[in-house]
């Protein structure tokens, strides 16, 4: 198979981990006889520095022309404490999602058995947890009208959803539930919020098309609690943009570390594959970032955008092998990990490559 992959490392540790993710794709191409052609493009803070824009037109053109995108992270601490900044790295990410029509963000939460002790949640609560989040990604309060009034003393953000937007993410989630344990939990705040009431109405309607899938509706505050209390009760979870952002960071702790979680953003065109962690400027340049989320994002890319199941499994098995051999990055090490088994970004990447 011959495919064009655009590598968009972005900011901070995005650069370091994406480099490793790309090497893994390369190793897969060699082993399975594919030809992957790479190009690279700027986004986020590095793009602002180079061009003044967080998503330069050139990047967008390359994105639309590629078969899949391996993405790093965006963000820079310089903007975090400056609420008045007019241009921000995150605007690049949001514009990319909108422009590419990436309305479905898949965030699989699966704990490798070897990491049962890396989580701050008790192993007996976690063992066997396997959740697939569908976070709606191009609507909600993220993209509604926002602004100030009363001479700047009042601020507002409008949350908006259309029936069509809820229907298309719902179908994706129901389809996925069918291939898994056939349970779907839809999360909203329909006791208070109007967009949530539309959300629930639409999910109930679509559910009629999937009589084989067991549907549960939850309020988001209850979900936040149940994820920690009993993560095993969840199979597929579908929710709105903001709730999904928050719940998936919480759920990442089920998998031991943010450094382990991959995501796929899909929709109308090219798919984007990225770790759920951010740019982590506190550890940037130190060579200690965990590249496993980027590597697992590459696995999702192979599976979802290219339909290469065997290749995708080869990547996941290699990661599993590395963990079984006892190797860890700092974020997933515990008190019992021998110092010699704690590896940096490139060294753990090499261990994965060996096993492919
Ligand atoms: C994510 C991130 C982004 C989001 C930020 C960087 C804008 O937290 O991808 O989850 O809120 O969607
Ligand atoms: Mn987030």
Image (spheres, helix red, strand yellow):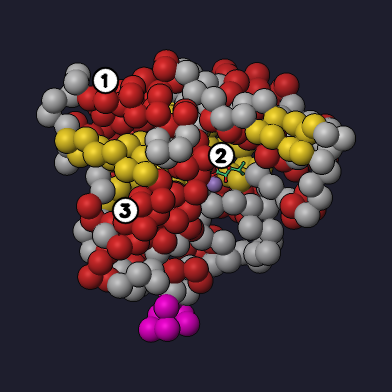
Does 24 lie within the magenta span?
no
Does 337 lie within the magenta span?
yes
For this rendering, which residue is in front, 255 or 218?
Answer: 218
User: Does dot 3 land on a helix, a strand or a loop?
Assistant: strand
**Which residue occupies 68% across, 39% down?**
90
Q: Is mark 1 within 8 Å of ligand 1?
A: no
Q: Is residue 312 left or right of residue 339?
A: left
Specify the label residue 71 is tagged with: 2
Specify the segment rendered in magenta.
Answer: 334-341
For this rendering, which residue is in front, 298 or 47?
Answer: 47
Relative image position of residue 98 (x, y in whole percent)? 58, 24
Q: Can you tell which of label 2 and label 3 is closer to the viewer?
A: 3
User: Does dot 1 land on a helix, a strand or a loop?
Assistant: helix
For this rendering, which residue is in front, 96 or 58?
Answer: 96
Please state, as top left, top right, bottom left or bottom right, where the N terminus lies in the image: top left
Within 10 Å of disc 1 (Cα), the crowding (few <14, some 14-19, many 20+) is few
Q: CA distance from mark 2 to mark 3?
A: 21 Å
Vertical position of residue 158 compared to residue 152: above or below: above
Residue placed under numbered mark 1 in the picture: 205
Within 10 Å of disc 2 (Cα), the crowding (few <14, some 14-19, many 20+) is many
First of labels 1, 3 by sequence position: 3
Vertical position of residue 239 compared to residue 271: above or below: below
First of labels 2, 3 by sequence position: 2
């Amino acid at each position: 198979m011959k495919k064009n992959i655009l590598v968009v490392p972005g900011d901070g540790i995005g650069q370091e981990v994406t480099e490793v993710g790309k090497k893994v794709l390369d190793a897969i191409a060699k082993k399975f006889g594919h030809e992957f052609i790479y190009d690279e493009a700027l986004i986020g803070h590095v793009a602002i520095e180079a061009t003044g824009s967080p998503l330069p037109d050139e990047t967008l053109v390359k994105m639309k022309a590629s078969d899949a995108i391996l993405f790093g992270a965006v963000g820079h601490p310089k903007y975090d404490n400056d609420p008045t900044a007019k241009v921000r790295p995150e605007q690049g990410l949001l514009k990319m999602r909108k422009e590419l029509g990436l309305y479905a963000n898949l965030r699989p939460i699966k704990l490798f058995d070897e990491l049962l002790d890396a989580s701050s949640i008790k192993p007996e609560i976690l063992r066997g947890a396997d959740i697939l989040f569908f976070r709606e990604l191009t609507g909600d309060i993220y993209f509604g009208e926002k602004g100030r009034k009363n001479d700047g003393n009042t601020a507002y953000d409008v949350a908006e959803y259309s029936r069509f937007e809820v229907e298309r993410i719902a179908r994706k989630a129901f389809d996925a539930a069918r291939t898994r344990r056939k349970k779907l939990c839809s999360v909203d705040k329909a006791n208070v919020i109007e967009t949530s009431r539309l959300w629930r109405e639409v999910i109930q309607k679509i559910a009629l098309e999937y009589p084989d899938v067991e549907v549960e509706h939850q309020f988001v505050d209850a979900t936040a609690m149940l994820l920690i209390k009993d993560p095993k009760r969840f199979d597929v979870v579908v929710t709105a943009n903001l709730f999904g952002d928050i719940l998936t960071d919480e759920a990442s702790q089920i998998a031991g570390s943010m450094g382990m979680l991959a995501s796929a953003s899909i929709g109308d065109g090219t798919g984007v594959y990225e770790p759920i962690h951010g740019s982590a400027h506190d550890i940037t340049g130190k060579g200690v970032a965990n590249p496993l989320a980027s590597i697992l994002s590459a696995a999702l890319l192979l599976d979802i955008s290219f339909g290469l199941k065997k290749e995708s499994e080869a990547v996941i098995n290699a990661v599993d092998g590395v963990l079984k051999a006892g190797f860890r990055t700092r974020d997933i090490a515990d008190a019992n990990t021998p110092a010699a088994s704690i590896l940096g970004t490139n060294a753990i990447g090499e261990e994965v490559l060996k096993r492919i």
